[in-house]
Image (cartoon, rainbow, N blue to C red):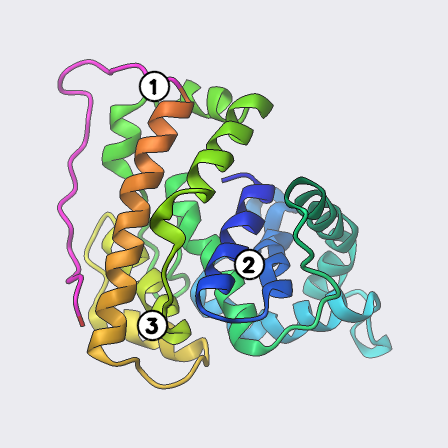
């Protein structure tokens, strides 16, 4: 998804978990790794990087300055450079929706929901190494990409009129009329990122990634099942609308790649 859609998505997740919606901007915190290019999606996106980067991101976004002892350090500098861009997308979201998500007044759990939503949602965009450095294998929606014109669909989907129509349909769907446990939702997003891996991600690694995010103890089986059911339904809707709004063309027989789900959807 594009940056604005990441904010839409995070705001919806924060709403259905009853958390602080000003944390929707945290969905853009992974993007410090847009520069230099060799860090893109490998520095700020992986789950195991979030605990180390979160205090830096929160401090710089809230205060708009770098403490003297951290001047010149990569993460601190990049968050300061990206801050106006992030604020610009927040303003654009508020103009489009009439919903205020300022001032920024964020707690840890809300921040983690926003940040994790970006890493998870990016598996629809490009191969995502979400478990670096503990696992190098990428996650992605391989079957979806195989069913689309896998290069040109992005240029069509991200045309302003198409992506706006996509957001309107996607975020007005009855899917969002639900209430979920915050920790269960985070865990579900980590699990579904693992499920989309090209190879099986060990369960203990998935559990470690979740635990490192610090959102509380493992959720109940009932709460996790509800969150997974929601996330899977969301994936089906998202894939359907990506096809629709990119005017996908069929690919030749045999061009696709099928990847079996390799992670249990339950607890």
Query: Mark 3 or 2, which is nearer the eye?
Result: 3
| For residue 72, side relative to residue 117 (left or right) | right
Question: Which range of residues does the magenta coloring cover?
Answer: 247-266
Q: Position of residue 241 (x, y in %)?
A: 36, 32
Determine crowd level at label 3: few under 14, some 14-19, many 20+ residues with C-alpha closer than 10 A.
Answer: many
Q: Does residue 204 appear in this view?
A: no
Q: Residue at x 29, y 75 (%)?
A: 207
Which disc, if any, is residue 248?
A: 1
Element under disc 2: loop
Determine crowd level at label 2: few under 14, some 14-19, many 20+ residues with C-alpha closer than 10 A.
Answer: many
Q: Position of residue 196 (x, y in %)?
A: 26, 50
Q: CA distance from mark 3 to mark 1?
A: 33 Å
Reading the image, the residue beneath label 2 is 44
Query: Mark 1 or 2, which is nearer the eye?
Result: 1
Q: Is residue 122 above or below residue 164?
A: below
Reading the image, the residue beneath label 3 is 184
Q: Residue at x 69, y 46 (%)?
A: 89
């Amino acid at each position: 998804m594009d940056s604005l859609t990441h904010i839409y998505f995070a705001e919806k997740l924060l709403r259905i978990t009853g958390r602080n919606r000003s944390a929707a901007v945290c969905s853009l915190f992974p993007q410090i790794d847009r520069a230099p290019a060799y860090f893109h999606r490998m520095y700020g996106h992986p789950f195991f990087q979030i605990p180390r980067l979160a205090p830096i991101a929160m401090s710089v976004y809230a205060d708009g300055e770098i403490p003297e002892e951290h001047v010149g350090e990569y993460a601190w500098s990049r968050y300061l450079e990206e801050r106006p861009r992030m604020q610009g997308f927040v303003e654009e979201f508020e103009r489009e929706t009439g919903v205020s998500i300022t001032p920024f007044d964020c707690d840890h759990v809300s921040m983690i929901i926003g940040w994790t939503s970006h890493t998870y949602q990016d598996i629809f965009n490009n191969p995502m190494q979400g478990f670096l450095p503990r696992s190098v294998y990428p996650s992605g929606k391989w079957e979806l990409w195989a069913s689309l014109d896998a290069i040109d669909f992005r240029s069509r989907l991200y045309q302003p009129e198409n992506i706006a129509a996509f957001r309107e349909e996607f975020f007005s769907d009855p899917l969002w009329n639900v209430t979920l446990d915050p920790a269960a939702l985070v865990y579900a997003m980590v699990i579904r990122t693992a499920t989309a891996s090209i190879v099986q991600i060990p369960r203990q690694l998935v559990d470690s990634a979740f635990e490192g995010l610090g959102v509380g103890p493992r959720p109940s089986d009932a709460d996790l099942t509800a969150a997974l059911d929601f996330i899977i339904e969301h994936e089906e809707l998202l894939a359907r609308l990506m096809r629709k709004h990119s005017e996908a063309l069929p690919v030749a027989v045999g061009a696709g790649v099928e990847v079996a789900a390799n992670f249990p959807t339950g607890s």
